Image (spheres, rainbow, N blue to C red):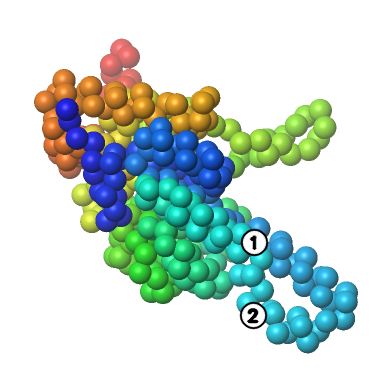
Amino acid sequence: MPSLATTYLGLSLKNPIVASSCPLTSELKTARALEEAGVGALVVRSIFEEQIRDEVAHMYAALEEAGSSAALDYLRADLPMRLGPEKYIENLKVLRRELKIPIIASVNCIAPDQWVKFARKIESTGVDALELNVYDIPDTPTVNSAAIEQRHTELVEAIRAEVSLPIAVKLSPYYTGLANVACRMNRLGVKGLVLFNRFLQPDIAINTLELDYHPHLSTPANLLLPLRWVAILRDMVDCDLGLSSGVHDAGAAIKALLAGANSVYCCSVLYREPVGSAVPAILKGIEKWMAEKGFGTIDDFRGKMRETVLGDGHGFERAHYVRLVTKAE
């Protein structure tokens, strides 16, 4: 029987399937169901910078209204890390205590001010790694791409300097120079890059004239963008690569590994009832394919379809419209 055992962020995983950050990974009941279904690790649902700032704003307003200026001055420096994050920290402790698979905490942040302190608290819970989900809508016309990339680099550098946990950075695909950003993160000493995060895209409800914030689950078509970039970046960086988005079956997971991914993130497919029921089929499908191809371990075929080993060296880098049009003719 082929072995699915692998490593990710320096952690030993029984297989490369990672439950991505989502509500299912933050509740003990569903997290345990995912573990029992067979995932190799899970990323706990992110805590968002906005959650903390909103709670802080309400607390400041209450203190000011009560005339508690002295208390406000005393708490101002540390208050952001005393509210919502405390619940998150306690939940991490519970998940780490109750589950056997590696637990990866996740923070969704773009500014370093309070996150360095919070990263230290996360480390104290005993979790195995930390994922920084850099989710940023660059909507300020006076801020150019270089400034945005520098801000993100400084955030990662600040947290990297303060904790010994393995750090993965979850990137968006929208950087002007994605390969450059990936290599800069790699030089900072992060253990992994996750390609990619998916931004919530608000819709417009035409009947109520309101914004609709319903999340949209991924489809198999969403695999192609991260697949391309894992293949391109595989030999550009030394750190691990996690592929995220569009993995709905064993075939997609195999493609991710062939491109060079060290881990394969699943999210939308985990919501099939019962929770996590798709995982065994994905694992069995990988094992069956490996046996048919004569591969005994993941390392036997990981990266066989990465950019640098393809015949012309431009399999993923070129747009290939000419090839497509020529074939159509």
Label disc, if present, on residue 77 of the rendered structure = 2
Q: In which image quadrant can residue 166 be found?
A: bottom left
Q: Which residue is mark 1?
A: 84
Is 37 above or below relative to 66?
above
| Residue at the outermost left position | 294
Q: Earlier in the sequence, mark 1 or mark 2?
A: 2
Q: In which image quadrant can residue 128 be found?
A: bottom left
Residue at 53% x, 24% y is: 273
Quick one: quadrant of the N terminus? top left
The three-letter amino acid code for the residue at tag 2 is Ala
Label 1 to label 2, Cα distance in Å?
16 Å
Quick one: quadrant of the C terminus? top left
Residue 328 in percent (x, y) is at 32, 14
Taking the image as drawn, is residue 192 in sight?
yes
Residue 26 in percent (x, y) is at 54, 47
Whether residues under marks 1 and 2 lie with C-beta atoms below 8 angstroms apart, the answer is no
Are there few (<14), some (14-19), or many (20+) residues within 10 Å of tag 2?
A: few
The kind of secondary structure element at disc 2 is loop
Taking the image as drawn, is residue 157 in sight?
no
Q: In which image quadrant can residue 87 be found?
A: bottom right
The three-letter amino acid code for the residue at tag 1 is Gly
Side of 319 relative to 159 (left or right): left
Residue at 51% x, 26% y is: 274
| Residue at the outermost bottom position | 70
Q: Identify which residue, 20 or 176, lies in the foreground.
A: 20
Are there few (<14), some (14-19), or many (20+) residues within 10 Å of tag 1?
A: some
Residue at 69% x, 79% y is: 76
